[in-house]
Amino acid sequence: MKKKRYYNKKQGLRYYRKKQFIKAISFLEKALIEKNDDHETYLFLGYASLFTGDIEGARRYFRGGLLVKEDNIELLKGLAYIYLKDERIEDAINLWGEVLEKNPREKMAKKALGNLRASKNVQNFIESAQPKNFLSRGPPIYIKIKPYLIGLSITFGVLISGVIFYTTPLYKKALERFYPEIIQLNKISFPSDVPISEEAEGILYSFSEKDIETSFIRIKKYIYKDRVNAAIVALNRIMLSNASPPVKERFKILYNFINTPDSLALDYNPRYYEIMKEPAAFEGVYVLWTGKIANLKKDKKSAQFDLLVNYEDEDTIEGISNITIYGTYYIENKQNVEIFGSYAGYDRETGKLLINGILLRDLRM
């Protein structure tokens, strides 16, 4: 298969960027055979040779590059560094001077001359000289930004595809096939009835007309995103608010689109004290609580017990919940468990929260 033009150079510079200098030299030397008048290839062969400890190779490549482009500042700086390491101080100074003639703002050449003049021990200065302080060693800018350009191109392509998908009938057809319930949810609109009721009896929450209307949109978004508990609490508050009966009926329909969530993907796990503050607003929410079993009663079909919430380590009890769960469970009093279930109400006589259990996990395992 025929290789693309400049393949070896691009591969060499790519390995140079990754600091795999041996591989970089291998590809760049092949590139030099293909095109022997490319000063940039000479330059990076010189850099790569330096970083592999091949001073003679670096000298050869820097000189070769200057034969192609004698006024190139980077090649001059490279050769000046070689002369410095050779202890050819005058030659190094002359090359740095030449660099500054071509570009008076060249910081590295200025710094090199300044540090050399200020050095009390020239031999120590030469021995401690490192390429990073004398050379602009980075790969060409197009090599640096190429990975980002590729990433941006892919991202842009995905965005364009997404826009096309969501603004054409394809999106609707996909929803109809895979998520028909979303189509039905989209059809439910906010009613045109007066949002607020004048009757104040039994109202726990008071909202403005705008609040009620925006709540309808927000709750639908919660359902789209499987934010089950957030949707339930928001719906409960509307049902206990000053919203008019016709509006509440429309909100009530949204409950039908809420499915039991995955216990490991709860959008929000309410604490015991939060439910105690607003027991009516939290009715139906899902909880994932740990604690110790007490007052256990069970038969072949179900088990009922009190859960001492957050009491696994004989620490403070957050509260007591009465759990009812169906199925056969090998559990006993004082056992630490994790329970996933839904809040079903508050028993005023016992002061306990009632939880309908769905899953139970033994924490001894």
Image (tube, rainbow, N blue to C red):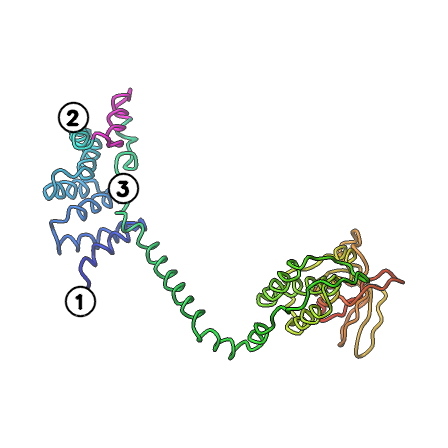
User: Which residue is depicted at the point 26% across and 39% down?
Assistant: 136
Disc ID at residue 137 = 3
Which-is-in-front pick, marks 1 and 2? 1
Disc ID at residue 2 = 1
Quarter of the image holding residue 161?
A: bottom left
Asked whether 356 falls inside the magenta stretch, the response is no
Residue farthest right in this picture:
349
Asked whether, in this view, residue 258 is left or right of residue 333, the answer is left
> Which amino acid does the dot numbered 1 rest on?
Lys
258 or 300, which is in the foreground?
258
Q: Secondary structure at mark 3?
A: loop
> Which amino acid does the dot numbered 3 rest on?
Arg
> Which amino acid does the dot numbered 2 rest on?
Glu
User: Which residue is depicted at the point 44% across and 69% down?
Assistant: 167
Q: Position of residue 209 (x, y in %)?
A: 67, 59
Disc ID at residue 39 = none
Asked whether, in this view, residue 120 is left or right of residue 257, the answer is left
Please give the range of residues in magenta. Answer: 104-124
Q: Quadrant of the C terminus?
A: bottom right
Structural crowding at the residue carrying mark 1, measured as other residues with C-alpha within 10 Å and reported as few (<14), some (14–19) or many (≥20): few
Residue 234 vertical placement versus 249 (above, below): above
Which-is-in-front pick, marks 3 and 2? 3
12 or 56, which is in the foreground?
12
Of the two numbered discs 3 and 1 on the same chain, state the one appearing first in sequence.
1
User: Which residue is depicted at the point 74% across and 61% down?
Assistant: 242
The residue under label 2 is 90
